[in-house]
Image: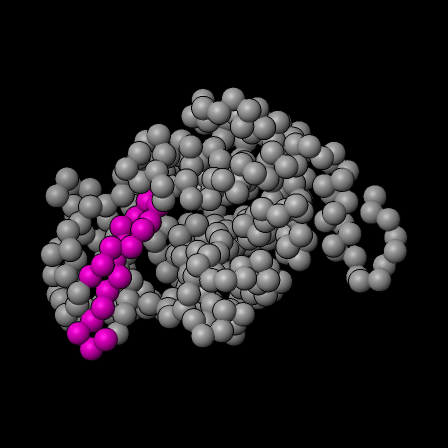
Amino acid sequence: MANDPFTSLQTPAPTFSEQQAIAMLRDRYGIEAALAPLASERDQNFLVTASDGSKYVLKFANASESAAITDFQIRGLLHVARAGTDFQVPRVIATNDGELMFEVESDSGSAHRVRLLSWLDGVPLRHAQGVGSMARQTGACLARLGIALRGFEHPASDYPLLWDIRNAASLEALLPHVNDEELRKLCEQRLERFRDVVAPRLDSLRSQVIHNDMNPSNVLVDSSDVNRLTGVIDFGDMVFSRLVNDAAVGAAYFCGAEEDPFGEVVKFLGADLILTRHLTTVMITHWRASMYPDNADYILRSEPRARQMLSFVAGMSIDQTVGRFLAACRPQGTQEEAT
């Protein structure tokens, strides 16, 4: 297993043809289907519509992803399913031979792990009206998912992942890829605070396997009732890390564009770690967009919000920022001043 967290984001996504994928579905699962490509950061995914109307997601893992990490993701989904939740997560579909994944070789000779997951109906929260009003529900859902993952162990869970907030200090190598000088300075300031203040405190906090990507594209709501959360998808950034990081990642996506960008975030929570997630988003997306310009629109989709929040907080004192979050943590009606 590679120890370099940059590797998986530098390796191009697989490029299997639809014809190859259709043949694998037929041979391995006995499924006759039509396919449609799905956007992905580093893997290759297809929406599978079977002849009987059933839908699935066929996933070809990036060549840099080891069999152990793919197995970790599969076992995580199985663990959550056994634990039980009031929302759905994808089911892992076994092959005709009972395998949960299998390995194929690309035309270039690289090995890729393949798996089939159930398709969850629903609308991604990102595309639903009233995203901000779902902050509290999404935070509660993430807490329940954390409880479901509690106690899950796997030998590959503590692998080096650049999207893991614990690895934020290593992002310094990506600073040259942020061409905007003002934005680069904001990133430098946030990196310095992470190294000096945040990182030394992280090691003492509770750790477990976390979802690590609770963004509005991975949260599903009912198509007929967008105020009802129905599912969570994309466990590809799941990792053993600090539990608080999961809350920080999720809260980062509820930073709004209104006069008070923290308005909905305080319903979710996070402070310094939320800003570290925004830092991570800016630096990784600028770096990857320079490597894969054809996919830049997808890669940079969350960058504007991250840029906005780094700029907004730059004009506040750390006491002001932390005070907002401490105030949100107090029970309603408490008059004690945040310190």
Count of numbered tags? 0
Question: Which quarter shows the N terminus?
Answer: top left
Q: Position of residue 204 (x, y in %)?
A: 67, 44
Is residue 231 located in the magenta-colored stretch of the structure?
A: no
> In the current view of this chain or complex, which residue is farthest to the bottom?
52
Question: Which quarter shows the C terminus?
Answer: top right
Q: Position of residue 164 (x, y in %)?
A: 50, 43
Residue at coordinates 74% horizontally, 47% vertically from top-left? Answer: 324
As drawn, 235 above or below 8: below
Residue 114 in which image quadrant: bottom left
As drawn, 323 above or below 101: above
Q: Residue 216 versus residue 17: which sits nearer the camera?
A: 216
Is residue 50 located in the magenta-colored stretch of the structure?
A: yes
Residue at coordinates 59% horizontally, 40% vertically from top-left? Answer: 309
Q: Position of residue 288 (x, y in %)?
A: 37, 34
Q: Is residue 59 visible?
A: yes
Q: Is residue 166 visible?
A: no
Magenta region, residue range:
35-53
Indicate left or right for 5 with 55 as reference. right
Residue at coordinates 40% horizontally, 31% vertically from top-left? Answer: 287
Residue at coordinates 80% horizontally, 62% vertically from top-left? Answer: 332
> In the current view of this chain or complex, which residue is farthest to the front?
259
Q: Position of residue 227 (x, y in %)?
A: 54, 70
Q: Residue 122 versus residue 271: which sits nearer the camera?
A: 122
